Image (spheres, coloured by chain):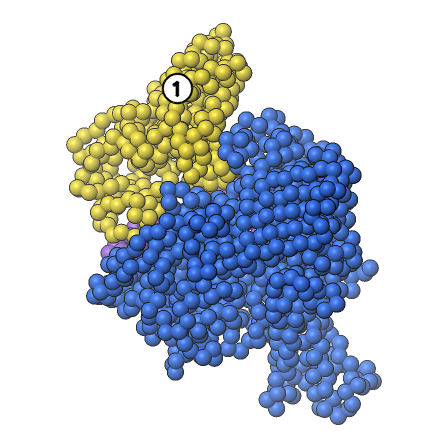
Chain colours: A yellow, B purple, C blue
Amino acid sequence: MQEFNYHRPVTITELKEQISIPGARILAGGTDIVPRMRQGKFSAPILVDTSGVKAMRFIEDQGSEIVLGALTTHQEAADSPLLQNINPALVTAAESIGCQQTRCRGTLGGNIANASPAADTLPPLLIFDATLLLQSLKGERRIPLEEFLLGPGQTDLLDGEFIHSISFKPMIGSWGAAFIKVGKRSGMAISVANTAVAVELNDKGKISDIRIALGSVAPKVICCRKIEQTLLGKEPGPALMKEIHKACQEEISPITDIRSTAEYREHAAEVIIHRALESAVEQAKERGR
Amino acid sequence: MITVSFLLNGKKASVTSLPNRTLLDVLRENLGLTGAKDACGGEGECGACTVIMNGNPVNSCMIFIGQIEGTQITTIEGLMEKGEFHRLQKAFVEAGAVQCGFCTPGAILMAKALLDNNPHPTDHEIREGLSGNLCRCTGYNKMIDAIHLAEQGGLDD
Amino acid sequence: MTDRFLTVGKSLHRKDAWDKTSGKALYTADIPVENLRVGMIVRSPHHYARILDIDKKRSLEIPGVLAVLTSDDIPGDKVFGPLIPDQPSLARDVVRHLGEPVVLIIAETKRAAQEAANQIQVSYEPLGAVFDPVQAAQEDAPQLHQDGNVITALNIKDGDIEKGFQDADHILEDTYTLPRIHPGYMEPETSLAVWGEDQTITVWVSSQHPFTDQGFIAAALDLPVENVRVKSGVIGGAFGGKEDSSLSIMAALGAWAIKGAVRLVNTRRESFVAHPKRHPAQIHYKLGAMSDGTFTALKAEVHMDTGAYASYGPAVAAILTETLAGAYRIPNVQVENFVVYTNSPLSGAMRGFGSPQSHFAVESMVDSMAEEIGIDPVQIRRANILKVGEKMFTGVTLNETANALPICLDKAQEIMDRFRAVEVSPGKKAGVGMALAAQSMGLGANVPDDSTHRLEWAPDGKVLIHLGAPDLGQGLAMAVEQITAEALGLPYSQVESLPLDTLDRPNGNVTCASRMTYMAGNALIDASEKLIQDLLAHAAEILEVPAKMLVYKEGQIIKEDGTKLPVVEFLGRLAEKSITLTSESTFSFPYPEETTPQDLPIGMPHVLYCFGAQVARVEVDPDLGTVEVTHFAAIHDVGKVISQSGVEGQIEGGVATGLGYALYETMLRKDDQWVDSFTEYLLPTSKDLPTHYESIILEIPEASGPYGAKGIGEIPLVPTAPAVANAVKNAVGVRVKKLPITPERVLGFID
């Protein structure tokens, strides 16, 4: 294991100072970084351990926005009654990650910063147009999550910056949000394809708003604008499968790797988008009553 | 070098180590507590290194030693009290859930964390809870039996 | 029949379980050692390459480095191998697989060892590698060893194959492909070696064959065997994968070089690439049958990939070949089986040893034939299963335990009907499938197979078993303790197995091949009888009566007048005279001359079989292709249950491993690297196994077994994969002929 200098801030101020040291990188839950360091795939001369910064572990309803501290663990997200109400797709996703032991350590911020194309928490955040608050010694900035993710393992995070929190607006009216993933195994499953779909129905039961995010089918988790366009204004039902199929072909570029093939991923993506849509529509109808 | 202070199996403990060592390294090499095992090469894929940290089951192979500052850690060695086996340990033996035993300490601690949080879990909840603890010997059935045996209080505590 | 057994048949507590649940059990990586040095192995980054030069100079200069060893530094035998001595302990001239050990570094610290590893200069000339055994068997393939790539070419015939197919009304042909899989023990390979005084060495191993390790270590270090002491640590699973001495030889080499203590622990990555796996195989299978379902002919051609070195390849080929006809009567058979070197990681022993591969072929084909003809799959099996006294195509006659076969089918039928009636989950397609299995016991004819064990009656009354073969974690110790307790009429708590140590334990041979409970059990029943006779003789002397006037029963000597004297009294008296009561017995696996065919290659045939059947209910998602095994039943004849919980545990664990083979596990090669971690190599977790599970244990006594017992170690994972494949076919009409049965295969995205 490569050597590093270690810092452990307790306040956000300390964190800002320590992360601004050249070469410093954030260590949160460690579930991605520690194994990758052991394999030589990640290195940093300085690690700033944020696990003691309690001020960044929270889930808050701030009225117009829901704000999640970056250090919220996946288990905390999975157990949150607030999130179950506001973004059930995120709860399903958080519950599906790894196992109990890794969920108790892995954080929302860490998952975002790691930017895996297969990350499960990213689609449910994207469909809610989540934005990140990035802080540094120099100040802070907000950036939509969609713009923050640049490629596999690549983000817009600058040296000296860290993710403070993630926020998104709750949906209103007749809405629903669902998450589905396909893995090669039920336990500790890494996604072969994963999707989150949010839908809003108008009073005629047609789709008045739709958000679809898809993981594991492109270099990063993507928002499927083409598929959304195709489905907008339509009546939900089995007939939409054809539309999804056509639009998917144009929108996504899955690869063949050790886990699966491009063709299967493409096929599975279509199936789960449709199923997540149906599930979200069910929720929307419930809320509409 | 860094020094961390924490509670280990109920007692105050302190360890000085290079910061790039994990909790698993320190337990096994500094503290002589070899109950936690490395079965997957420190990737968090097997649960054989599971310990309980502040009430949560965690993979000690993925925690750098600095991160345990101020926490409460329970290892398998800390489960016995005054020479008496914990009811989960008795249940695992009684139910025939121990074969080679390499995954056993991690599985028992995971089971403890599960029962502490959810005293009467369903089979489904147990399978969910154990899904991060790999076992090649038992097929998990008897571990599930053992956990039910323990939660039903059939054995003295 | 009333239960006349005191101990045998019960579910008792394993004595080693308490230490295992409390973290006190010492696996080889846990044993505390003073002045322990660090060992690190530098491994080949190439699949196949010539070694041009190894320059140790810079690494030797690093402070804290104590030794940098290559093949040249090995004082004795530089190669070893359980069947063919073709495996270098450290590579010499050529590396034949990725991860092959080339240099062994011993240092004072991990850091120094790592630095030295970074500074080693090995120049390689990469050569064109071959990974497919069919390709590697061709003349124009790179020749990986001196005598070519095909190490075994079996051609076993029975009857008249041409006529057999002429007699057939239906002929089906298919190719079945079996992947490379990892035995998956949780404890990686580990060995601790400590140099002693006067040219002696003690080596702790996690191994199925400590006495074999002793021999190889002595040969490598050019020491007399008596100077090498091998001790067994607590073993964290083996499943065949720990019948390889490479790590113990290297640890011993390191300790010898520095005259100190060295422990080698493989990382999980090293375990993947450098320790034996299950043989991948391609089985081309052609079956002929009449319209009433009677099988007439079987022709098979098999290519087995034994990887870079032979390991147990030829022996696995033997069992794969012998079990290709399953438990069926097929009068005309021809099997060709080629064991071929490739540049893949070694294939060697793994639980099942050829039988999981052969059964995937035969049990899939039998179902296919049933469908072709239009007969129920249980019915076609009923029509063809061998009866007591009938012969397998190898000429082996099945004894009365073949009566298990129709019972297995009856039970399977009943279970299939029950599983078929289960309500199908919405959106899913359900299917039920079964498979039958015959698994051999023993090492095969003309292979020496003796197992020696010893008993000692300690003065405090405890009977100590000097067990000559290791308990791998499966509960061998508990089983033999129950057998010995039964034989001596003593409580289980009064019998204890001692850890294995070549210094003072007898040689019990390798724990493998579903036979150690059978062999050790038989030896210990005999040793118990000897012990009792010895005790009576001594007691008679002490009491000054003729021995025939005394009777032994359940820990007591009974005099003619009915007086009962506890055995401890006599043991105490003997101890005063420094007499220890011991007995020893050797059991040899029986190959009766009259019934064992002698016309087959060495190691064939196997003459004693275990039988079983398994039934799987699956639900398949027709759009995603995912397969969930919802219900599973395992029906196994064990002759006689020695330990109830032990037998159940073996079956349940074996089924889980079989389901891994069926659905999840494969060690692929992508981007020139092998899958080498549990992130990509998927073992079944608790969420991946059936929630409804049943074991049905039959007891059809095996006359030659201890209290009628047979083996159970391997068969539980033999019929599993074909049972699942047959269920998937039943559910969605897709016949998957390549394992694992992944969603991509079910939907036809890959073959």
Q: Residue at x 47, y 29 (%)?
A: A264
| C563 sits left or right of A265 in the view | right
Residue type, mark 1 in image: Glu
Q: Please provide percent x and percent y for residue A42.
A: 28, 44
Q: Residue at x 55, y 76 (%)?
A: C505
Q: Nearer the viewer, residue C504 or B150?
A: C504
- The kind of secondary structure element at disc 1 is helix
For mark 1, name the chain: A
Residue B154 appears in the rendering:
no
Which residue lies under the disc numbered 1?
Answer: A250
A203 vs C400, nearest the viewer? C400
Position above or below: C331 against C622: below
Location of the N terminus of chain C (image quadrant): bottom right
A38 left or right, relative to C181: left
Can the viewer see residue C471?
Answer: yes
The answer to which quarter of the image holds residue C146 is: bottom left
> Residue C307's spot in the image, x, y percent?
46, 54
Left or right: B73 in relation to A22: right
The answer to whether C397 appears left or right of A159 in the picture is: right
Q: Nearer the viewer, residue A271 or A60?
A: A271
Please tell me which residue is depicted at 44% across the width and 13% down the height of the picture: A231
